[in-house]
Image (cartoon, rainbow, N blue to C red):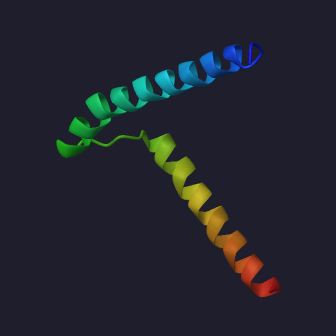
Amino acid sequence: MGHSCPMIILVLAMLLVTGFAVAVVGLVAVPAHREGRELLTVKGEGVIDAARERVTTLRRHTADTH
């Protein structure tokens, strides 16, 4: 049991940091989105569009092979 204590502390710390990150997003991004402001830059939108296109291509390719 003595060896698992550092791991428990690490997991709790990771959960705490994740909770802080969610709180920051909630305090910053959600009100900005409600006011109609864009959350991503033009470059960020381009990255998302490219990723969506790759996923669509991959789905089509995967569907063709099955």
The residue positioned 56% from the left and 48% from the top of the image is 47
Q: Nearer the viewer, residue 1 or 54?
A: 1
The answer to whether residue 7 is above or below residue 27 is: above
The answer to whether residue 28 is above or below residue 51 is: above
- The x and y percentages for residue 59 are 68, 74
Quadrant of the frame with the N terminus:
top right
Quadrant of the frame with the C terminus:
bottom right
**For the view shown, which residue lies furthest in the front direction?**
1
Q: Nearer the viewer, residue 12 or 45?
A: 12
Q: Is residue 65 left or right of residue 41?
A: right
> What is the count of numbered marks?
0
The residue positioned 43% from the left and 28% from the top of the image is 19
Answer yes or no: is residue 38 visible. yes
Answer yes or no: is residue 36 visible. no
- The x and y percentages for residue 31 are 21, 37
Q: Is residue 47 left or right of residue 40?
A: right
The answer to whether residue 58 is above or below residue 9 is: below
The residue positioned 27% from the left and 39% from the top of the image is 30
Q: Nearer the viewer, residue 60 or 43?
A: 60
**For the view shown, which residue lies furthest in the left direction?**
35
Q: Is residue 38 left or right of residue 54?
A: left
Q: Is residue 17 left or right of residue 33?
A: right
Question: Which quadrant of the structure image shows residue 51?
Answer: bottom right
- The x and y percentages for residue 18 are 49, 28
Question: Which quadrant of the structure image shows residue 20?
Answer: top left
Q: Nearer the viewer, residue 2 or 63?
A: 2
